[in-house]
């Protein structure tokens, strides 16, 4: 069964304090938007991921749209309006299941996401929650009454639904503003299964919540950094391929595969971060099946191994060292190509170039070198 996700990021979060909206404030080195996209993006069976933005934030949309798995939609006046618009955006290719998540919950775990998806195999709707353990009072300056907490839960997201059912529920909902999508589902008499929530899956609401989220995210992170370096000599030809982009040139690069020196360096950086050797160990040059292979095969394999082990790419930086061809005019296309293969936003990719001031083999125009760094995070 196909699964899509909607990340609702159109609110302004006034209670979170002054300054920029809370989804754009950094927590443990990344915005809440980036954290949520990474958490859901790490689930390879979730696509597309609909990011619902405030109208004021839509200038940021092109950067996110560069990721083929991300669909950006402008939100509405209320949370329910934004969710409805996100649901309608999926109408051309409707999924079987849809997860709806608040961007204010950047600490959501893979375990919670998977629990909701699994529950939807047998339920029309499912949502994570935690049973109340504290005593409940009603009052003002003094306690007026104690309340029974039996059967009461603290709701969390993502809340999951069969797509067709929750779309009907949203389109038919009338009444007061709903607190969440479970309220809308219940109004249409949908049965919602409860799955185990997570204490760390907090919702950033007040200023102090940022500090707690920071501690959770930093405490859970396993950060790996790897470096890659590669060199290829020139030979007769009419183009070079760098970062998957074909660039006209009076010579080509010599290699067993397509000799994409930059993509080789980046692949090795990812393998290095994982402690899994290099391209040569996975794709031996003596093996004829890799003759003239497109280097995206290597890069896709490397990032695939990372995801299998629970890591996501948080940044990749590639420096190409050559006198010619000129890299600058092609750098945006290179970023976009790498981002597509790695299925991340282009703003996580850096491609730049330098010369060696006519020193050494690159300075003499005998070939091209590339240096790359990749950072992986398991959270």
Image (tube, rainbow, N blue to C red):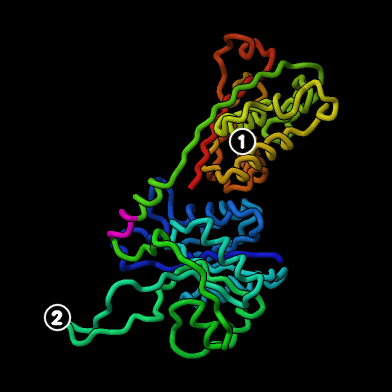
Q: Position of residue 350 (x, y in %)?
A: 55, 36
Query: Looking at the rendering, which quadrant does residue 209 occupy?
Result: bottom left
User: Does residue 116 appear to the left or right of 25 in the view shown?
Assistant: right
* Picture residue at 69% right of the left edge, 40% below the top: 300
Residue placed most toward the observer, 131 or 283: 131
**Marks 2 & 1, CB-CB < 8 Å contact:** no
* Picture residue at 40% right of the left edge, 58% below the top: 200
Q: Which residue is mark 2?
A: 141
Q: Please, which residue is most extreme toward the left here?
A: 141
Kindly tell me whether residue 56 is visible in this rendering: no
User: Mark 2 against mark 1, which lies toward the viewer?
Assistant: 2
Stretch of the chain drawn in magenta = 208-212
Which of the two labelled residues, at mark 2 and mark 1, occupies the earlier sequence position?
A: 2
Report helix, strand or loop for mark 2. Answer: loop
* Picture residue at 59% right of the left edge, 43% below the top: 309
Kindly tell me whether residue 199 is visible in this rendering: yes
**Are there few (<14), some (14-19), or many (20+) residues within 10 Å of tag 1?**
some
In magenta stretch: residue 34: no
Quadrant showing the N terminus: bottom right
Q: Position of residue 98 (x, y in %)?
A: 61, 69
Q: Which residue is mark 1?
A: 331
**Are there few (<14), some (14-19), or many (20+) residues within 10 Å of tag 2?**
few
Tell me if residue 240 comes above or below residue 218 in the rendering. above
CA distance separating discs 2 and 1: 62 Å
Q: Please, which residue is most extreme toward the bottom here?
A: 175
Residue placed most toward the observer, 53 or 280: 280
Q: Position of residue 369 (x, y in %)?
A: 63, 20
């Amino acid at each position: 069964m196909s699964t899509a996700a909607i990340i609702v990021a159109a609110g302004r979060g006034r209670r979170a304090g002054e300054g920029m909206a809370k989804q754009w404030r950094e927590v443990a080195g990344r915005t809440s938007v980036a954290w949520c996209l990474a958490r859901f993006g790490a689930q390879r069976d979730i696509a597309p991921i609909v990011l619902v933005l405030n109208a004021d934030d839509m200038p940021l949309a092109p950067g996110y749209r560069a990721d083929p798995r991300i669909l950006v939609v402008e939100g509405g006046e209320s949370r329910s309006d934004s969710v409805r618009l996100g649901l309608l955006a999926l109408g051309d290719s409707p999924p079987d299941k849809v997860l709806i998540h608040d961007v204010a919950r950047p600490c959501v775990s893979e375990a919670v996401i998977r629990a909701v998806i699994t529950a939807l195999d047998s339920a029309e709707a499912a949502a994570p929650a935690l049973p109340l353990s504290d005593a409940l009072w009603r009052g003002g300056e003094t306690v007026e009454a104690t309340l029974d907490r039996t059967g009461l839960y603290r709701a969390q997201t993502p809340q999951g639904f069969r797509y067709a059912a929750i779309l009907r529920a949203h389109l038919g909902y009338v009444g007061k503003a709903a607190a969440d999508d479970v309220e809308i589902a219940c109004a249409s008499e949908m049965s919602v299964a409860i799955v185990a929530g997570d204490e760390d899956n907090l919702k950033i609401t007040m200023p102090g919540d940022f500090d707690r989220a920071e501690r959770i995210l930093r405490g859970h992170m396993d950060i790996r950094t790897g470096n890659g370096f590669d060199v290829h000599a020139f030979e007769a030809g009419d183009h070079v391929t760098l970062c998957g982009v074909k660039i006209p040139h009076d010579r080509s690069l010599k290699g067993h595969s397509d000799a994409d020196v930059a993509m080789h360096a980046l692949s090795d950086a990812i393998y290095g971060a994982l402690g899994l050797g290099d391209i040569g160990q996975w794709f031996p040059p003596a093996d004829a099946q890799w003759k003239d292979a497109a280097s995206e095969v290597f890069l896709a394999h490397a990032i695939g191994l990372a995801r299998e082990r629970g890591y996501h790419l948080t940044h990749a930086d590639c420096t190409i060292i050559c006198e010619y061809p000129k890299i600058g005019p092609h750098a945006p296309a290179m970023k976009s190509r790498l981002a597509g293969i790695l299925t991340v936003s282009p703003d996580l990719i850096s491609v730049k170039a330098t010369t060696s001031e006519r020193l050494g083999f690159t300075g003499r125009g005998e070939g091209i070198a590339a240096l790359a760094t990749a950072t992986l995070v398991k959270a």
